[in-house]
Amino acid sequence: MGAYIAGVLVPLVFTLLLRNSKNRKRRGLLADVGGEPGYAVRNHRFNSPVETAWKGITTLAELFEQSCKQHHDKKFLGTRRLVSRDTEVSKDGRSFEKLHLGDYEWLSYGKVFEAVCNFASGLVQLGHQREERVAIFADTREEWFIALQGCFRRNVTVVTMYASLGEEALCHSLNEVSLALPCTLNICNVPDFLATISASSL
């Protein structure tokens, strides 16, 4: 009978001890942000909300620029070029496409930042105004990232529309955002994209 009592009491004592030790280690302090109390906490080392983790950095564009300056010559964006594609048939009769890719080709932080600045300048040359919207219609790739950062440099709201979207979803996205400038980055998608734009009510 003593073994049963020990089997029940020992885990109970350990649970209570662990619960008390977790309460002592809590590093967050309750913060009054309005609404129901007790749900918002802040780091115990700061008396007020932290505006930014980096001094002098207030936007994503400034953070990206700082990173590019700090790591100018380091590898940043890597792309593997398509060498060939094969269609293989499995034993159960299903076919699938197998891609053969080359080695990574790298762009440094400095080269990417230069491309981002050129893209942002291109937006200015096209007459794009700050705080307008740009839709990026592309697969996720290095050009997509460069366009995104270029838009951030111009303080532009970015709407991403992936090439895998169906025509109906794409039309809906275009109508919802009232675009000033659609941007397509994959040349094979341009005819489909233009047809979709003319089909939507833009």
Image (cartoon, rainbow, N blue to C red):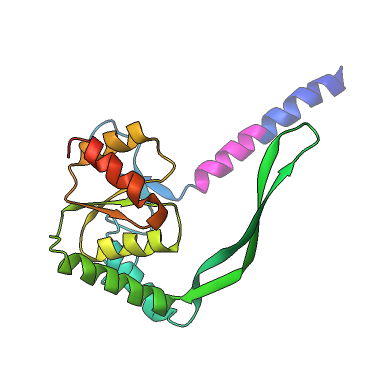
Nearer the observer, 181 or 132: 181
Q: Main secondary structure of the magenta part?
A: helix
**Which quarter shows the N terminus?**
top right
119 part of magenta stretch? no
Against 188, is 13 above or below? above
Residue placed most toward the observer, 62 or 148: 148
* Location of residue 53 in the rendering, given as x and y in whole percent from the top left corner: 35, 64
Q: Residue at x 79, y 21 (%)?
A: 5
On screen, residue 129 versus residue 45, left or right, reads left
Residue 63 position in % (x across, y down): 33, 68
Vertical relation: 38 (above or below) 148: above
- Residue drawn at 35 percent across, 35 percent down: 167
Q: Single out the residue that lies furthest toward the bottom.
A: 73
Q: Is residue 21 left or right of residue 183?
A: right
Residue 200 is situated, as x and y percent measured from the top left of the image, at 23, 36
Which image quarter holds the C terminus?
Answer: top left
Quarter occupied by residue 155? bottom left
Could you say which is closer to the camera, residue 5 or residue 109? Answer: 109
Residue 195 sits above or below residue 36 on the image: below
Q: Nearer the viewer, residue 111 or 165?
A: 165
User: Splitting the image into 4 quarters, where does residue 148 fall?
Assistant: bottom left
Question: Viewed as shown, does residue 107 lie left or right of 32?
Answer: right
Is 21 within the magenta? yes
Q: Which residues are magenta?
A: 15-25
Query: Residue at left 40%, top 35%?
Result: 166
Kindly identify the residue that appears in the image at 21 percent across and 41 percent down: 177
